[in-house]
Amino acid sequence: MQVFDRVNEDAYEQVVFCHDRGTGLRAIIAIHSTRLGPSLGGTRFFPYTSEDEALEDVLRLAKGMTYKAAAAGLDLGGGKAVILGDPQRQKTEALLRAYARFVDSLGGRYITAEDVGTTQPDMDIIKRETRHVTGVSPSLGGSGDPSAATAYGVLHAMKAVAVHLWGSSDLGGRHVVVSGVGKVGQALVRHLVEERADITVSDISESAVQRAAGDFAAAVVAPEKAHAVACDIYSPCAMGRALNPRTIPELRCAAVVGAANNQLDDPSCPELLDQAEVLYAPDYVVNAGGIINIAEELKGYNRQRAYGRIRGIFATTTLVLQAAAAEGIPTVVAADRLAERRIEQLSAVQLIRTPLGPT
Ligand code: NAD
């Protein structure tokens, strides 16, 4: 890969290659934008098959964080980090602390959090070397696992979709299919039970399905058939790319509102969703509850204030759906424009800001 050409393509501010001979650390930190504030994004620890693959992943994810934070109305930019390696075999305290010193060396331009392959205890270790980390344990002043906050945000996105489609935020009696009942999916099902929705769940893990079906009396469908169940809302809460040219024509839902990142497989998907007459609530708007929650740590975590802000996902989702309808554009384009407009409007006043902003 021609690194500088690629970095220039999407206007990344800084890409840092971190190497520590003693611990074997090989990591890349990508800062896409600090125009709205310090960049925030998780650290992914993953056995990439090549350095190019790792670099492309961190660049793509960092840019995604810029849009997610901007659309959520946060005073944060977008960044992400990857550690190359197998977390099962290579994750040690020494390696994490070496990595944390690189994060610290950026002086707050990049703030980290957990992601695939890293955990809350890992963030606690990182905290010993730098204050530029979120998602640490409540005993260290953190907000803990963001999954419950993410699920709470998804619920409010569903309510916004319900108002848009059916004129009421009441989900009682609506049939919702939750595909993937892990940390977020399970918490979402709990909310939907309280809303008196009819729920169908699916998961590749038998124990996850049993837990959801047993605890909440949900119906069960095989994972490969979940997207094709006739329902009001299909909620992908497992891995990315649930919506692709094969699955979209088989959808029998009115709307897709889920927590999974990167739900659309390729650029043809918005058009296919339109043809299928399925309303798509953009993933990064819907699943912003987690980042809104950890961002509150930067001010001193207060759960009530954080959850109040997460409820704002209702308004953001509404804004995106209305703009898409009014302008005749896909909802993903409306969400991107919302984020870009906010960055554009605010970047002028951010020019002389110190990396950590107001104290
Ligand atoms: P998790 O690993 O706890 O749960 C994922 C679940 O999906 C697991 O139970 C797994 O068995 C299941 N699964 C995997 N492949 C599947 C398939 N093909 N069909 C059905 N089920 C399948 O992860 P999580 O933290 O609940 O996150 C779920 C999704 O939401 C991910 O895409 C994640 O990136 C995204 N997300 C999570 C958060 C958060 O706060 N945890 C925030 C934003 C976005």
Image (cartoon, helix red, strand yellow):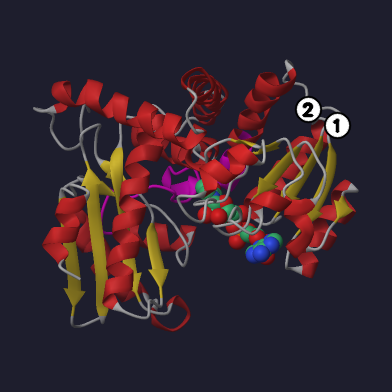
Q: Which residue is located at x 84 percent, y 27 percent? A: 172
Quarter of the image for the N terminus: give it. bottom left
Magenta stretch, residue numbers: 128-152
Task: Judge whether 3 appears above or below 249 on screen.
Answer: below
Near mark 1 (Cα within 10 A), the count class, few <14, some 14-19 or many ≥20, is some
How far across and down, in percent of the image, does residue 135 sit? 44, 49
Assign the magenta stretch its main secondary structure.
loop
Residue count near mark 2 (Cα–Cα under 10 Å), binned few <14, some 14–19, many ≥20: many
Q: Is residue 29 above or below residue 173?
A: below
Reply above or below: 21 against 235: below
Residue farthest left in this picture = 352
User: Which x, y percent locates residue 273?
Assistant: 60, 42
Residue 197: x and y in percent read 83, 34
Amino acid type, residue under disc 2 in the picture: Leu
Circle 2 residue: 171
Q: Judging from the image, what secondary structure is the residue with disc 1 in? A: loop
Tell me what residue is drawn at x 74 percent, y 20 percent.
Answer: 166
Q: Confirm whether residue 44 shows in the render.
A: yes
Q: Which residue is mark 1?
A: 196
- The reply to whether dot 1 and dot 2 touch (C-beta < 8 Å) is yes
Q: Which of the image's four quarters has the C terminus?
A: top left
Q: Which mark is residue 283?
A: none
Residue that extends furthest to the front in the rendered view of this protein: 275
Quadrant observed for ligand 1 in the rendered image: bottom right
Sooner in the amino-acid sequence: mark 1 or mark 2: 2
What amino acid is found at the position of numbered circle 1 in the picture?
A: Arg
Tell me if residue 131 is in the magenta stretch. yes
Taking the image as shown, residue 75 lies to the left or right of residue 297, namely: left
Rendered residue at 66%/56% (across/down): 247
State whether residue 96 appears in this view: no
Q: Is residue 224 above or below residue 252?
A: below
